[in-house]
Image: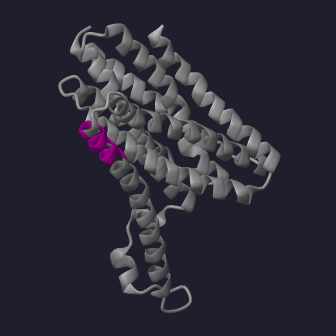
Amino acid sequence: MSTTHVLILGAIAGSTIFLGLPVGRIKGMNAPTRAGLSALATGILLFLLWDVLTGAVDPIETALHARHWGRFSWLATLGAGGFALGLMSLVYYAEWMRQRSHRRASTLVGPGAAAIDEFAHRNWLDNLTPGKQLALLIAVGIGVHNFAEGLAIGQAAAASQVSLAVTLIIGFGLHNATEGFGICGPMSGEGTQPTWGFLALLGTIGGLPTFLGTLLGQGWSSEAMSVVFFGVAAGSILYVVQELFAVNRKHGHTVLVTWLVLAGLLLGFATDFVVSASGL
């Protein structure tokens, strides 16, 4: 298989994330439906958390079992550092956004009037609802995760393991199709209808890294960098999952939400079986 064919298939695998995004445009959803979509997104992201943690930990455990203490210590440090970076960077970002919002509200100088500073420092992020902000964070976390998956595709192709590369492309393509639902979950949960342009932005952030990882993986292989990227993805996804659990509690509908969290988790594992089948 030529490099061009692998890159085309890698791009297709990344673009399948757009298949689930139109759900964000559905109008007139009642409260149980919104709660259900948010819960389904939570379940899918719980699976992704397990998936990326496995990708980060496996090389570390391999070094440990081989008693390569220096390599074990190096990879473990990189994994822990990446995890802390992915988690805490979003925590600090969220705190910065909250403080910014509070300061902006305090600059109002009268009924219906805003201070000049309000307009001077306002940007498009300030106009996003909490659900859209969370969806953006989910897309970033998924994008980091998909970059690491793209590296796996590219490295398999570079090693002339064509059947493995194709199977990974199919499996990751199915994964990405479900990730679109995960991205839209917070917006559906708050009843927000995003524009097509915003959905396209989210899909690009989440899906393009699959192609970029495939491109890079064909010419460069680094187990250490894979551990870092999986660690960063795991930390960012953990932050998003805890935020979604808070959203789900506000919705109520405990039985429905729990069933659909379970359904999302099982859906993630079902798509993972396609990738696992490459070992048969």
Classify residue 229 as left or right of residue 219.
right
The residue shown at (37%, 49%) is 80
Q: Residue furthest left?
A: 219
Hey, which quadrant is residue 216 in on the image? top left
The residue shown at (25%, 37%) is 71
Q: How many marks?
A: 0
Residue 75 covered by magenta stretch? yes
The residue shown at (46%, 39%) is 53
The answer, for residue 53, to whether it is visible in the render is yes
Give whichever of 222, 48 is nearer the camera.
222
90 up-or-down from 256: above or below: below
174 up-or-down from 192: above or below: above
Give whichever of 58, 12 is nearer the camera.
58
Q: Residue furthest bottom?
A: 110
Residue 135 covered by magenta stretch? no
- Residue 144: x %, y % from top left: 37, 42
Classify residue 127 as left or right of residue 246.
left
99 up-or-down from 247: above or below: below
Find the magenta span and give its range: 70-79
